[in-house]
């Protein structure tokens, strides 16, 4: 009986040790399982290294690049490194350079790139972000030296495509990085160059303004010539234009309006007088015509004075245009001496008219110059 009690006492420590060992093993298993589990995000790539090497897996074990989700690696044996597969935006520091036409400029840009082969991006280059930044700086300086100032300012899209082509050729094949886009952000010029370009732009704007103004004046002159030709064919249109101008000027009540004498009215009077006014304004020819008509009138009056009573049958003396007409008639007989000058000619005409056309109450057969009978005989 004593032996049985001792045997039971020996079994109790053995069971405790066994339970402790089992607990430790389970705990280690849980720790190992926890350390072997990895979570790969949707925007990441998981690269697995076994003993420092990238090994491809077989059908029972996943390959080196693990997809997004929960994955497991062998603790201590394998190591996972995650790579971001999103598009990364990187600013390229401003670079100073001299253009092809010897202008000093300062240009900065921005680069958009993405990892397409995570194994190459991790294995072939130490820090692919820094490497892309350095490639961007050197490519930007190279493009600045191959471009002139006008192209750098006006054809940025073409320069962006050239930069992208240069960088993508270097990064995509060896590094597994694709350059999606390169954009030039700003081009800084020296102050002297800015002033020169401002003066040049101002001169160009002034030149264009003068060309436009000259073209407008040319078109306006053509329209004005056409309008003048149309108005010359229709005088009424000219009068309407004159009235329209008068209305426009009189709309502003701060000026004095002087109405010109219509030219068409002068032409109307000229047509009514048969062109005598034009002959009088013609200078020497008008004066010669007037002198001839005056001499003819004096000759007719002299013949009338010599004929005496036969003056009644003398033809009427044509009127002399331009001579002053007397305000009264002279009743002196024609037998006396003929008056001199214009007044004499006018008096002679008045006397001849009275003799040739006696009043209605006097007999037609009474000789000229006989005094009227007071008794009415």
Image (cartoon, grey):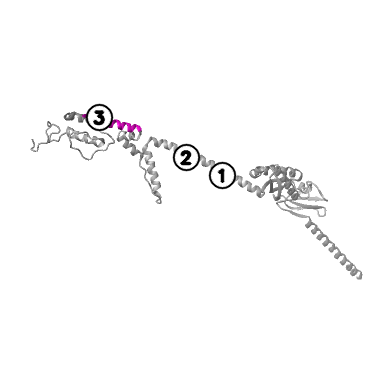
Q: Which residues are magenta?
A: 284-303
Q: CA distance from mark 1 to mark 2?
A: 21 Å
Cα–Cα gap, marks 1 and 3: 79 Å
Dot 3 corresponds to which residue? 299
Distance, label 2 to label 3, CA atoms, is 63 Å
Residue occupying the far right of the picture: 3
Q: Position of residue 222 (x, y in %)?
A: 47, 37
Magenta stretch prevailing secondary structure:
helix
Q: Is residue 291 magenta?
A: yes
Query: How busy is the neighbourhood of tag 1: few (under 14 within 10 Å), some, or many (20 plus)?
Result: few
Which residue position holds label 1?
A: 206
**Residue on which disc 2 sits:** 220
Neighbour tally class for label 3: few under 14, some 14-19, many 20 plus, Cα within 10 Å: few
Tag in front: 1 or 3: 3
Q: Nearer the viewer, residue 81 or 341?
A: 341
The answer to whether residue 39 shows anywhere in this view is: yes
């Amino acid at each position: 009986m004593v032996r049985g009690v001792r045997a039971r006492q020996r079994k109790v420590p053995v069971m405790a040790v066994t339970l402790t060992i089992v607990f430790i093993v389970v705990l280690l298993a849980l720790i190992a399982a926890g350390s072997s589990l990895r979570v790969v995000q949707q925007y990441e790539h998981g690269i697995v290294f076994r003993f420092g090497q990238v090994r491809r897996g077989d059908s029972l074990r996943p390959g080196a690049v693990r997809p997004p989700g929960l994955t497991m690696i062998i603790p201590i044996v394998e190591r996972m490194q995650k790579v971001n597969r999103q598009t990364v935006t990187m600013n390229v520091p401003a670079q100073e350079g001299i253009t092809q036409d010897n202008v000093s400029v300062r240009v900065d840009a921005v680069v958009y790139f993405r990892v397409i082969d995570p194994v190459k991006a991790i294995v072939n280059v130490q820090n692919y972000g820094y490497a892309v930044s350095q490639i961007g700086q050197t490519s930007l300086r190279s493009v600045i030296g191959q471009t002139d100032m006008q192209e750098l300012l006006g054809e940025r899209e073409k320069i962006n495509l050239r930069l992208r082509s240069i960088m993508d050729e270097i990064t995509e094949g060896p590094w597994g990085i694709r350059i999606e886009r390169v954009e030039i952000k700003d081009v800084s010029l020296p102050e002297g160059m800015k002033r020169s370009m401002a003066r040049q732009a101002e001169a160009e704007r002034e030149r264009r303004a003068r060309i436009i103004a000259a073209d407008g004046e040319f078109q306006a002159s053509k329209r004005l010539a056409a309008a003048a030709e149309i108005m010359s064919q229709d005088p009424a249109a000219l009068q309407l234009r004159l009235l329209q101008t008068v209305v426009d000027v009189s709309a502003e009540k701060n000026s004095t309006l002087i109405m010109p004498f219509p030219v068409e009215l002068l032409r109307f009077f000229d047509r009514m007088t048969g062109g005598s006014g034009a002959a009088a304004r013609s200078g020497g020819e008008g004066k010669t015509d007037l002198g001839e008509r005056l001499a003819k009138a004096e000759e007719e009056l002299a013949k009338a004075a010599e004929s005496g009573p036969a003056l009644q049958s003398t033809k009427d003396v044509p009127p002399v245009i331009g001579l002053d007409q007397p305000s009264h008639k002279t009743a002196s007989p024609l037998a006396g001496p003929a008056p001199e000058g214009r007044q004499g000619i006018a008096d002679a005409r008045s006397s001849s008219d009275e003799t040739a056309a006696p009043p209605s109450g006097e007999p037609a057969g009474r000789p000229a110059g006989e005094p009227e009978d007071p008794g009415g005989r």
